[in-house]
Image (cartoon, coloured by chain):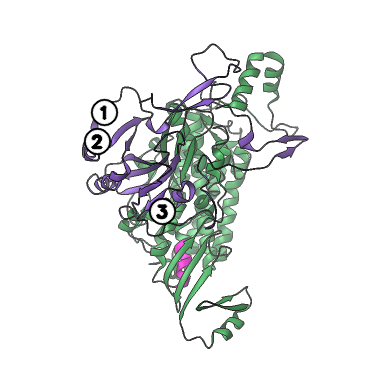
Chain colours: A green, B purple
Amino acid sequence: MTATDADDARTFTVTGQDWDDLTDALKDVKDERIIVNMGPQHPSTHGVLRLILELEGETVTEARAGIGYLHTGIEKNLEFRPWTQGTTFVTRMDYLSPIFNETAYVLGVEKLLGIGAEVPEKADVIRVLLMELNRISSHLVAIATGGMELGALTVMTIGFRERELCLDLFEFITGLRMNHAYIRPGGIAQDVPEDTVARVSEFIELMKKRLPELAALCNANPIFKGRLEQVGYLDLEGCLALGLTGPVLRSTGYPWDLRKTQPYCGYEDYDFEVITWDTCDSYGRFRIRLAEMWESLRIMEQALKRLKDLDGAPVMVADKKIAWPSQLSVGADGQGNSLDHIRHIMGESMEALIHHFKLVTEGFRVPAGQAYVAIESPRGELAAHVVSDGGTKPYRVHFRDPSFTNLQATSVMSEGGMVADVIVAIASIDPVMGGVDR
Amino acid sequence: MNDQNIGQNSGMFGVEDTGDTSGYGGLTRQQATPSRTSDVGVQPYGGWFKELADALAFTEAEAVIHRGELTFHVRRERLLEALQVLRDELRFELCSGVSGVHYPADQGKELHAVYHLLSMTYNRRVRIETSAPDADPHVPSAVAIYPTLDWHERETYDMFGIVFDGHPGLTRILMPDDWPGHPQRKDYPLGGIPVEYKGATIPPPDTRRSYS
């Protein structure tokens, strides 16, 4: 520990394992008011989030969040790549819900292209299937890390064990555990592997046994309830003023879910409930996430049923000016090339080679205009504001990330409470810093 | 309104109305203002679009409909009045934020601030767009009307240099406090270095051959 005197305040820098030194140094300090700088590297700040807390004893009188530590300039980078390559960027924004980022961006591009209605049914079904799988994995991390921050490590190990199953499925279907770049303008990158229906069904059956474990561990646990109930309170008025959406908004009892109110990707054809709770607190948000995973399983079951009937159906728009020319898949040699396609363009058709070359290097053009497309991500309204000047690259893409907006509620949720409640309140917002900072 | 061209792109391809497909004819393509692109034949519009246009008529807002989305272009002096009416009378309870767009070629209104509003009561969305010249990048802050805009306006200031007058604490939010420049502006370089891959050198993205 080091102590310095600057201006009118004494500053202590603690590095861990030096609690005794700190209490000794503070013995002669009469003032109870201290300012604690928590993060950006701290195990309980839910990522690289910096919190500046003004404390009166153990009560938080002022809380401010400092962000920007994960800013990577993805929106700027998008303006220098063809439209299709945009998916590889946006998938890295909110790294716990990559499929949602991709879908929001792709729906925006499709809206500008005017091909929304031409996207094949199978692509929509697969998008819904993956989004709901992603919702489960994201909610599991929210609950797991939230539990960890309370000291409930079993909640964390259970949550991450289940999430691993989700990631295995993602790897099986898209080829990657994260950063998939699987949803593409016009459809999806390639058809799902043969065993998909069987493996996803297996997963759903397993989750039906595993989810009750999480519920049995937490729902009525007196310590868990004691820590979460009436903590991080924010009512409907506060939510709307501060722009909060997702589980936080639904914990006020307002059933606002874009899947129901403004359906996309065919959500209107699925049977599911919008989960609400009426306590406006962290416990309610936890219960909503838990119950939403069940609804996601329900949607996935319905999607699988559809998928069975769509064997061999196209997964990309028929328009050859937009659809990616080849179906890439990892071959026996470990290379991601389609040998049939190479044979075709290199040996059989000059026109196919020109077409491939133009579409892959130059990309397709998107008519000038702007579109705003919002979808319901696990954290709320995730939207892409896509602007095109008619070129082969985005003119501007802005992501309205729910984590960014929701994190603004840190102050109102935690001021007046205890230091320990700040952690619970933030965990209940479930901000993902990759999405906040982009 | 498609004729509101704001510039020219010269590249190799993507030009219509010419037989030269080789791309070596020094082709140029007119650049349209995306925010003013509107669907052909949708005006006069019916339903709630009309209702909104009537309610905002006093602000001299100009309506554009594109891909089924309604945009009102409002002069920055009238922005707050328009937002107030939208929130209080037309029940646009939720503001999804503000996003900036930089059009260097749009003389006199280079910087655009785009607000996305959502009415949960009526399940409607509308976009309000306002602009400011580069020489005077000031737009009134709407934090008092929609508190959620606090961080969104800070981000737009950080990325585009639009100064939101009346914001309670307009500081940088994503970039470090002492960062020079505003990264999302079109005149701000992307940066990057050439990368060697399997013996070949890949130039940084902003110096690669461009087709648009």
Q: Which residues are magenta?
A: A416-426
Q: Position of residue B3 (x, y in %)?
A: 38, 23
Q: Are marks 2 and 3 in contact (CB under 8 Å)?
A: no
Relative to B192, does residue A217 appear above or below in the rendering? below
Q: Dot 3 falls on which chain?
A: A
The overriding secondary structure of the stretch rendered in magenta is: helix
Kindly identify which numbered label has been placed on residue B45: 1
Q: Is residue A419 magenta?
A: yes
> Separation of disc 2 and disc 3 at Cα?
34 Å
Asked which secondary structure carries label 2, the reply is helix
Q: Which residue is disc 2 drawn over?
A: B53
**Residue A245 seen in the current view:** no
Amino acid on which the number 3 mark rests in the picture: Pro
Relative to A294, does residue A14 appear above or below in the rendering? below
Residue B127 placement: quadrant: top left
Relative to A393, does residue A162 appear above or below in the rendering? below
Residue B194 placement: quadrant: top right
Kindly identify which numbered label has been placed on residue A247: 3
Residues beneath discs 2 and 1 located on the same chain: yes
Q: Position of residue B54 (x, y in %)?
A: 21, 36
Which callout, 2 or 1, points at the residue further toward the start of the chain? Answer: 1
> Badge 1: how crowded within 10 Å, few (<14), some, or many (20+)?
few
Q: Dot 1 falls on which chain?
A: B
The residue shown at (59%, 78%) is A4
Q: Are marks 2 and 1 in contact (CB under 8 Å)?
A: yes
> Separation of disc 2 and disc 1 at Cα?
10 Å
Q: Position of residue B205 (x, y in %)?
A: 62, 37
The residue shown at (42%, 31%) is B34
Amino acid on which the number 2 mark rests in the picture: Ala
Amino acid on which the number 1 mark rests in the picture: Tyr
